[in-house]
Amino acid sequence: MTNMHLYDEAVSKMLDENPRIETKEVLEKITEMGYKGSTTMCYENVRKLREGKINNTTNQLVTIFWVPPKASNLFYIDRRRLSKEEKLFINTLCTESKEIKRAAKLIRQFKSMLKKKDGSMLNAWIKNAISSKIKEIKGFAKGLLSDFEAIENGVNYHGVMAR
């Protein structure tokens, strides 16, 4: 018999705080807390808890109407400023779609570049954006190439749009 059920609350909290936490890390943490059961039992329990959270997430998201401009803006806003529902929405989108997850990463990288006023990163970002095959981001990146030097200077000296 296993003592895994004694750690359900702690595991659930870990999954709430970081939905992408690796099961290996969960096992390490609960082992430190005194878990003495098998690795297989832990992995199975974490899988069941994740499935329950995904099912609950899907049910919660149905009640909120998300328009594309509002949804896409969420990727640009600092995650600390997002509501619980907004974070849940972003996590669900990124879990369900590799393309959206890639777009979110590119958006955050672009914002970071602007915030740091580091135009040296612009060329590499544009190459990554174009190779992403995400139509909207690819188009934006190609537009940046039309006057690359001016855009790079704008990033370096003015921190355009860096809020």
Image (cartoon, rainbow, N blue to C red):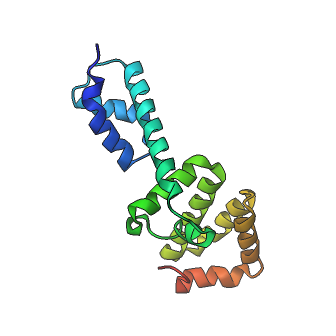
Question: Residue 68, image x and y in percent?
Answer: 62, 68
Q: Is residue 102 visible?
A: yes
- Quarter location, residue 79: bottom left
Asked whether 104 or 8 is in front, the reply is: 8
Question: Residue 67, image x and y in percent?
Answer: 60, 69
Asked whether 3 or 134 is in front, the reply is: 3
Q: Residue at x 38, y 35 (%)?
A: 25
Which residue sits furthest front?
63
Q: Residue at x 45, y 31 (%)?
A: 47
Quadrant of the snapshot with the N terminus:
top left
Above or below, 86 relative to 143: above
Which residue sits furthest top?
1
Question: Residue 33, image x and y in percent?
Answer: 22, 31
Question: Residue 30, image x and y in percent?
Answer: 28, 31
Q: Is residue 110 visible?
A: no
How many discs mark residues in the rendered view?
A: 0
Q: Residue at x 63, y 60 (%)?
A: 103
Left or right for 60, reference 69:
left
Left or right for 41, reference 95:
left
- Quarter location, residue 73: bottom right
Above or below, 106 relative to 73: above
Asked whether 82 or 152 is in front, the reply is: 82
Above or below, 85 relative to 142: above
Q: Residue at x 40, y 65 (%)?
A: 83
Above or below, 106 relative to 39: below
